[in-house]
Each structure stands twice: as structure tokens, then as C-alpha cells.
């Protein structure tokens, strides 16, 4: 359970950073399409982890974590695209990528652990 608590905290902190980045992109660059995509995927991770906390079954728990994993991977895609198109700096990209990758790895480990228990 402690891993889930860390995952819950890290996903919430990541969502806060995503929201701030989205605000920045809209204000500084008038960029709405990519920032909205990132906003959806980046905030969905934590929401899915929260849903998994009260899953109806182990299978439902695993399913929600798997979707969270997909959302983390999608968030990395949007960050890469924002960096490649010069909307965010290397420093911003590296920092956000580090957090997203950490979440991705934690979700992969959680999904693997859950599958072993099924």
C-alpha cells in the first residue's frame, strides 16, 4: 500500500505541474490544442489512481492502473511534441519528462505486481 500512497502523491503533484504548464502555454504562447491534450492526459493519471483505490475488484483495479499507464505514456508524447515545436524549453521538458517517466515506471511496477497476484 505504501507504493500506492507514493503513486497517489506523485500523480497529484504531476497534475498540478501539468495545470501550471497548460496555463503558461495558453498565456505565453496562445497555444490551446496541445496544452489541452496534455492537460487531459496529465491530470487523468491521478484521477485513475484515485479510482483504483476503490475498485470493485482486483481486475478493475488492474484495469484502472493500466489506463493510467497509457495516460502517462500519452503525456510523455505531448511533452515531446511541445519541446520539438519550441513551446517549452529544454529545462522545462527535462523536468516534466523526469516526473512523467517516474510515474510511468511506478505504474508499470504496480501493474506487474497486480498481475502476479491475480
Image (cartoon, rainbow, N blue to C red):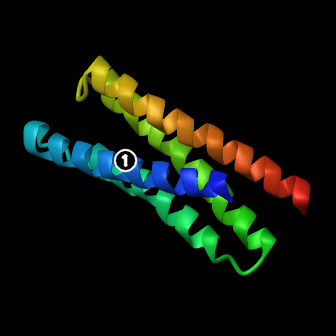
Q: Which residue is mark 1?
A: 38
Which residue occupies the foreground of this view, 68 or 13? 13
What residue is rendered at 29% in x and 20% in y?
91
Q: Is residue 37 visible?
A: no
Helix, strand or loop at disc 1? helix
Is residue 24 shown left or right of residue 34?
left
Quadrant including the N terminus? bottom right
Q: Residues within 10 Å of mark 1 (few under 14, many from 20)?
A: many
Which residue occupies the foreground of this view, 45 or 12? 12
81 w.r.t. 35: above or below: above
Quadrant position of residue 64? bottom right
Quadrant including the C terminus? bottom right
View extreme (front): residue: 2
Which residue occupies the foreground of this view, 8 or 118? 8
Residue 112 place in picture, x, y as percent: 80, 48
Quadrant position of residue 57? bottom right
118 w.r.t. 108: above or below: below
Amino acid at each position: 500500500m505504501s507504493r500506492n500512497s507514493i503513486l497517489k502523491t506523485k500523480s497529484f503533484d504531476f497534475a498540478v505541474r501539468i495545470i501550471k504548464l497548460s496555463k503558461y502555454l495558453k498565456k505565453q504562447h496562445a497555444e490551446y490544442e496541445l496544452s489541452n491534450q496534455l492537460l487531459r492526459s496529465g491530470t487523468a493519471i491521478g484521477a485513475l489512481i484515485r479510482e483504483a483505490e476503490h475498485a470493485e475488484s482486483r481486475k478493475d483495479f488492474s484495469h484502472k492502473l493500466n489506463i493510467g499507464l497509457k495516460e502517462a505514456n500519452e503525456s510523455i508524447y505531448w511533452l515531446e511534441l511541445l519541446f520539438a515545436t519550441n513551446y517549452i524549453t529544454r529545462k522545462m521538458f527535462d523536468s516534466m519528462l523526469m516526473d512523467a517517466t517516474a510515474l510511468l515506471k511506478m505504474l508499470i511496477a504496480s501493474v506487474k505486481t497486480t498481475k502476479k497476484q491475480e
